[in-house]
Image (cartoon, helix red, strand yellow):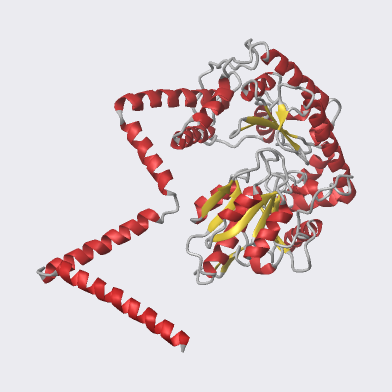
């Protein structure tokens, strides 16, 4: 009886409020013509639709208001002229650093009237291979070339030549390539402790591996009824996740890092999860600072909320799987962690395969099915492809397979030990330079450097003047070296530490001096509140990559110490 009386009370309350509402609406519309009531209804509906569209766009209201504000500012004559002048200067500096030709060189802008002979062609090729001042063979480049072993290079060239015309799009014509790709995936699954249902595909690189995982989880989310799929990822996660969100109409929620460890803040990640979250992301390790995110803790979040978890191991995946056997322990990061549903790892980095190869792996085939694309009704036949590309270079897959078979587990373990030993040797010596510091606790191959005393980009400039090519990072300002096999040779690591020490000593003669050159561009880019300007500068840089105009040979001054280089 008590329940019935309670329900009756609620019913009476609802009827009372409905009565008041009805009376109010009737009073408000009293005396109006029918067409007026219809017009107000239409206008109210349109306003509601507009408000819904305004409030629930992928971009936040604050972000859109900020963009609108800066658009207005840029249209004001005084500001527009000043901004354009600085943009032109930045683009000019970028162009001078990219458009470098040897004296007397010109661009080829049309086909030769007659094909070149083999000897003439090879002579021309020689010109292209000798362009540039950075000599990666000496180990003065961060990352980029991960092996450079002469014998392996010859082997890859030979294998690629044998499969140069092959295409895995046609497994009936090239069954050997199909078998090789399947074996590369299975070997990778085994390395990352995948079970019998684990699977994956070979892709063209880390970006495509990440894109494929995001696409799979977006489609899975849409099937589950999520209308606005979201990626929840650390701010240190690779920009390929932002690219995936842009390409696939997803939203990405960036989670801050712990300022001491540079690992993702797990509590903040938990708060970022919503009903629209279709995947969680962590890195093993992350690119900027070489720090391993706490995969086990994020795996628990993934299990608790029943959300797929992607571990991005594109950079160091083929190091971390061998570190235990090389004598270095790491917290679990692979499919042994419950909640991990996919992993990306680049075979063309520490797998030492040729550029253009990576793997994306899944704990179960049900996830990979969402990655696939099928057009069942195409007039050209049923079209099905596992990744973004249709035709793919079988030669790259064959060379990747050959590299893995050539190195073997023992070869990878030895290489891993050399690299980790070298990275920790560099860390130990850099920590002795009191004017700089190391970000977080890097456990793999990346060592990121910062300073509270001087602009760290001055150190980048100074190291560039000594022949080094390091990665410049932002938010916070830093530079890093990604240790490869080339850095393990001879005295390369000691030379690096010595050059850092010498450069810092020179900088400390005038620590407050402002940065110039490319370092200044990076510093400026961080400080610009209107991020569309940074995008515009980046567009200009990308345009430069495709320019065939002869460059201006004036070189801008770049400072690290107080002298010109």
The residue closer to the viewer here, 350 or 310, is: 310
Q: Residue at x 60, y 44 (%)?
A: 256
Q: Quadrant of residue 28?
A: bottom left
Counting labels gives 0
Q: Is residue 308 above or below residue 74?
A: below
Left or right: where 206 falls relative to 35: right
Q: Is residue 212 above or below residue 290?
A: below
Q: Is residue 194 above or below residue 517?
A: below
Q: Residue at x 76, y 19 (%)?
A: 501
Left or right: where 560 falls relative to 68: right
x then y, percent, for residue 141: 72, 30
x then y, percent, for residue 188: 77, 56
Is residue 212 visible in the rendered image? The answer is no
The residue closer to the viewer here, 148 or 80, is: 80
Q: Residue at x 21, y 69 (%)?
A: 24
The residue closer to the viewer here, 458 or 441, is: 441
Is residue 338 visible in the rendered image? The answer is yes
x then y, percent, for residue 223: 54, 69
Q: Quadrant of residue 33?
A: bottom left
Q: Residue at x 72, y 28 (%)?
A: 437
x then y, percent, for residue 292: 73, 45
Left or right: where 115 falls relative to 46: right
Location of the C terminus (image quadrant): top right
The residue closer to the viewer here, 142 or 22, is: 22
Farthest bottom residue in view: 1
């Amino acid at each position: 009886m008590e329940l019935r009386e309670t329900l009756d009370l609620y019913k009476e309350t609802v009827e009372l409020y409905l009565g008041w509402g009805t009376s109010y609406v009737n009073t408000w519309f009293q005396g109006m013509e029918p067409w007026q009531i219809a017009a107000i209804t239409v206008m109210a509906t349109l306003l509601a639709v507009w408000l819904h569209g305004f409030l629930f766009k992928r971009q936040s209201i604050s972000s859109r208001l900020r963009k609108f504000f800066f658009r207005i500012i840029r249209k004001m004559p005084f500001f527009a002229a000043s901004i354009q002048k600085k943009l032109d200067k930045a683009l000019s500096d970028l162009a001078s650093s990219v458009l470098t030709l040897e004296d007397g060189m010109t661009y080829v802008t049309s086909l030769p009237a007659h094909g070149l002979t083999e000897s003439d062609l090879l002579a021309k090729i020689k010109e292209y291979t000798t362009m540039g001042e950075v000599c990666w063979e000496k180990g003065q480049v961060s990352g980029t070339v991960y092996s450079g072993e002469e014998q392996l290079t010859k082997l890859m060239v030979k294998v690629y030549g044998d499969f140069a015309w092959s295409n895995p799009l046609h497994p009936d014509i090239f069954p050997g390539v199909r078998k090789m790709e399947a074996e590369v995936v299975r070997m990778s699954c085994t390395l990352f402790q995948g079970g019998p249902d684990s699977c994956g595909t070979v892709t063209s690189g880390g970006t495509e591996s990440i894109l494929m995982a995001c696409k799979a989880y977006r489609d899975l989310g849409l099937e589950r009824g999520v209308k606005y799929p979201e990626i929840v990822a650390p701010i240190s996660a690779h920009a390929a996740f932002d690219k995936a969100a842009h390409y696939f109409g997803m939203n990405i929620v960036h989670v801050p890092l712990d300022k001491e460890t540079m690992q993702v803040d797990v509590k903040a990640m938990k708060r970022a999860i919503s009903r629209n979250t279709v995947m969680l992301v962590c890195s093993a390790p992350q690119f900027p600072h070489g720090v391993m995110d706490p995969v086990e803790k994020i795996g628990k979040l993934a299990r608790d909320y029943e959300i797929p978890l992607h571990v991005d191991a594109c950079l160091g995946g083929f190091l971390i799987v061998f570190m235990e056997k090389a004598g270095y322990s790491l917290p679990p990061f692979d499919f042994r962690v419950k909640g991990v549903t996919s992993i990306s790892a680049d075979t063309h980095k520490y797998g030492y395969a040729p550029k253009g190869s990576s793997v994306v792996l899944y704990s179960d085939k049900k996830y990979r099915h969402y990655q696939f694309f099928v057009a069942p009704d195409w007039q050209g036949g049923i079209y099905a492809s596992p990744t973004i590309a249709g035709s793919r270079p079988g030669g790259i897959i064959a060379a990747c397979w050959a590299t893995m078979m050539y190195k073997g587990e023992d070869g990878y373990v030895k290489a891993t030990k050399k690299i980790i030993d070298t990275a920790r040797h560099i860390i130990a010596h850099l920590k002795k330079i009191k004017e700089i510091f190391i970000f977080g606790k890097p456990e793999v191959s990346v060592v990121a450097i910062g300073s509270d005393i001087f602009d760290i980009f001055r150190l980048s400039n100074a190291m560039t003047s000594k022949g080094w090519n390091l990665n410049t990072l932002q938010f916070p300002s830093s530079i890093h070296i990604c240790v490869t096999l080339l850095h393990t040779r001879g005295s390369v690591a000691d030379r690096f530490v010595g050059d850092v020490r010498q450069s810092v000593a020179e900088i400390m003669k005038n620590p407050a001096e402002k940065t110039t050159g490319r370092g200044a561009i990076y510093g400026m880019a961080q400080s610009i509140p209107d991020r569309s300007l940074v995008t515009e500068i980046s567009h200009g840089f990308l345009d430069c990559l495709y320019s065939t105009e002869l460059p201006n040979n004036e070189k801008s001054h770049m400072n690290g110490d107080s002298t010109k280089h």
